[in-house]
Image: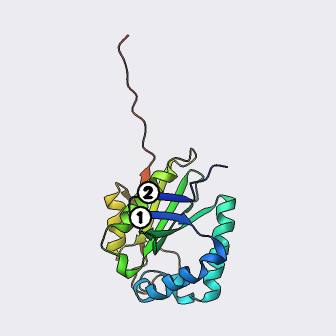
Amino acid sequence: MERPRPVIECADVALRSWRGEQDFPSAHRLIEESLDHLRPWEPWVAQHSEENTRGFLARSGAGWLGGQVYNYAVTEDGTLVGMCQAYRGAEPTGWFMGYWLHPAATGRGIATRAMSALTSEMFTLPTVEYLEIAHDSANTASAAVPRRLGFTEVRRERAAPPTAPSGTGIEVIWRLYRPRAHTIVRPV
C-alpha cells in the first residue's frame, strides 16, 4: 500500500506524522492553547481532555498503518503550530482534508502552505483522483485556503450533527481533481 511521506517539508513549514505518546505533551498543549480559537468551529473541542488527546494520537498511528487517515503535526521553523490531515472519503478515489492552527499562527499563510504541501503529496498516490475540503459556510477564514489552492466549490449540504457553536449547519464542499499531464503531439 502506498502512503504519503511521514515528513513533508515546504520552506519554513513542515508536516510530520504524529509519534504517539511521545507527542502527547506538545499536542495537548497546542490544543489547550487553541481552545477559545477552535471552539466556535470545531465540535470536538467540547469533549477535549487528556484522554481524548491520547486517543487521537493512538488512532493516528493505527489509521496511518491502515491507510485510512494521515494525521500530521504542522510546524513552523520547528515549532508546533497546528494540525492537518487527509482521510478517505466515501468513494475510494476521493479523500477529505482538514486543518487548524494555533491562533498565534493564523493570518500568515501557514495553513495555505501546509495544505498545498499535503495536496501535492496526496496526488503522488496513484489511487487519489480528487481531494475535498469542507467547512461551515460562516467560517470565512477556512474558505480562503481551498480558494487560494485552486479548489472549486462543488456543493453545500447540511452538516451532520453535532454542529459547531458558531456554525450555520451548512457545509461548503470544495474539490480539486488530480492535475492531468499534458500530452504533447509531435509532428511525424
For disc 2, the marked residue is 117
Of callouts 1 and 2, the N-terminal one: 1
User: How was this image coloured?
Assistant: rainbow
Q: Is residue 29 left or right of residue 24?
A: left
SS state under label 1: strand
Q: Distance of mark 1 from mark 2, alpha carbons? A: 9 Å
Q: Neighbour class for label 1 at 10 Å: few (<14), some, many (≥20)?
A: many
Residue at position x 39%, y 33% in the image: 182
Name the spot of residue 175 as percent of width and height, x first.
42, 56
* Residue tagged 1: 13
68 or 109, which lies in front?
A: 109
Would you call the spot at circle 2 few (<14 residues within 10 Å), some (14-19), or many (20 or more)? some
Q: Is residue 48 above or below residue 177?
A: below
Taking the spot 32% from the left edge, 60% from the top edge, the residue there is 147
> What residue is drawn where x is 49% and y is 82%?
30
Tell me the quarter of the image containing the C terminus. top left
Q: Which of 122 and 6 lies nearest the eye of the viewer?
A: 6
Q: Position of residue 124 (x, y in %)?
A: 52, 47
Q: Residue furthest front?
A: 78
The reply to whether dot 1 and dot 2 touch (C-beta < 8 Å) is yes
Q: What type is the residue that disc 2 sits on? A: Ala
Examine the rendered structure and indicate whether residue 57 appears above or below residue 39: above
Q: Could you tell whether 106 is left or right of 5 in the image?
A: left
